[in-house]
Image (spheres, helix red, strand yellow):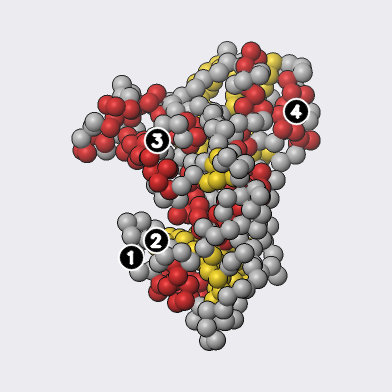
Amino acid sequence: MGTYYLMISTRGNNQPLVWDQAVQLKPGANSITLRSEQRKSAWTQVERLLWGEIRKSVKTSTIPYPKPSKTRLELGPNRYAMGLSANEGVRFQGWHGKILIVIDEAPGVKPEIYEAIEGIRAGGDVRVLALGNPTVSSGPFYDAFTTNRDSWKLFTISAFDTPNLAGLDVPSLLALPEDELDRNEHPYLTTRRWVKEKYYEWGPGHPLWESRVMGSFPKQSQDALFSLTWLEEAQRREPEHDAQVALTAGIDVAGPGDDETVLIIREGNNIIATHVFSQADARGELMAALLPYQSRLAFVNVDAAGIGWYMTKHLGENFRVQGINVGTSPADPGRFSNLKAELYWGLRMRFEEGQMAGLIDEKTIAQLAGMRYRHNARGQIVMESKDEARKRGVRSPDRAEALMLAFAPEYSCEEEVDTYEQDRVRISRF
């Protein structure tokens, strides 16, 4: 029996996380590394990221490995390791014998791939190592930790189990002085400072804290507006662009004490751009960000309440702008308490139905995952207010608001601002 070292790379917190794990391979055994192909760059990730680590590890190993090719390592007669990108189950037919299958980013691998792997496991000595962040509360990877847990040997690794945070818990981490936050024995692993930042950004109970810090599948709150599973799927889904589709922009203007003015541009159900501005007066920066899209922009939706009204007038000089006051009455007052609840519910339906793509901004995902709603005494859907959210330690959801506005429909004009602006600046009222 020989001992071979495989470098298995899986993305955690959007950074490469490398596990140096000794894997026992019997004589004649083969290893297959498998990566989800939800994006067109999946094969590039297999070749450059995952197998790049393997090639680098071989060079520094004390074991005299033969030189690997881009995605294959020949260990002897009928003994090899190879990388595949998982897009079709038929690619995994015909494998037999002594095989180790390593599934990278396991939550994103399609169910039909797992079914094909079960076909391989039907004969021979086949072992499966599945690695991934517990962000999606459905699918075969989730089932391995729940309904099918008897068939697997399970390991849950939280940030506090990693070398840089060994011996710490949340209270002791928060009490560390500034200089000790940057003392990380392995800086390529999860750092102390990152965990502390995410504690204040997300906090205990937030699904992203549970999944990306504590290593547990998130317990979705019954009053959560968006399922983290929907958001993660929209993050992985590849946008299908169509240059003939008009663009729509949504702008949430920072008020007093707020940190960000946010611009989000969409093409159909695809999010194609997110711009964030920290300036107290971001009119010039917003104008510069919008101008490259001017020829394709159908209209720009701006939160017209309060300070947003002045931004609406300013942008109306160059763009067709729709000022939206989300505190006004909805089109369906029997179901929604106000326009804000109605627009957010429409956005929720797009995510639930799997229409959304291009959601790659982590802060937008975090804000959407932390949103709550309830039903009032009349049975209407009511969004949690910003004051109520602050009591839970949640900051103003500027990016989520901009996304909601980007998907607001075009309304009929019932009030013209003035003769000069009547074709550009409009206030939506029902």
Q: Earlier in the sequence, mark 2 or mark 3?
A: 3
For this orientation, the residue located farthest to the bottom is 420
Of badges 2 and 3, the one in the foreground is: 2
The residue tagged 4 is: 115
Tell me the distance, in whole angstroms, between the alpha carbons under discs 4 and 2: 49 Å
Of badges 4 and 2, the one in the foreground is: 2
Quick check: 297 left or right of 199?
right
Neighbor class of circle 4 (other Cα within 10 Å; few <14, some 14-19, many 20+) is: some
Q: Earlier in the sequence, mark 4 or mark 3?
A: 4
The amino acid at mark 1 is Ala
Task: Name which residue lies at 60% across and 77% down.
Answer: 295
Task: Name which residue lies at 69% across and 25% down.
Answer: 78
The residue tagged 3 is: 203
The amino acid at mark 4 is Glu
Tell me the distance, in whole angstroms, between the alpha carbons under discs 2 and 1: 8 Å
> How many circles with numbers are drawn on the protein?
4
Given residues 48 and 280, the one toward you in this image is 280
Task: Name which residue lies at 43% across and 48% down.
Answer: 386
Tell me the distance, in whole angstroms, between the alpha carbons under discs 1 and 3: 27 Å
Tag 1 near tag 3, CB within 8 Å: no
* Residue 252 in view: yes
> On the image, which quarter does residue 409 sit in?
bottom right
The amino acid at mark 3 is Gly
Q: Secondary structure at mark 2?
A: loop
The residue tagged 2 is: 254
Tell me the distance, in whole angstroms, between the alpha carbons under discs 1 and 4: 54 Å
Q: Which mark is residue 280?
A: 1
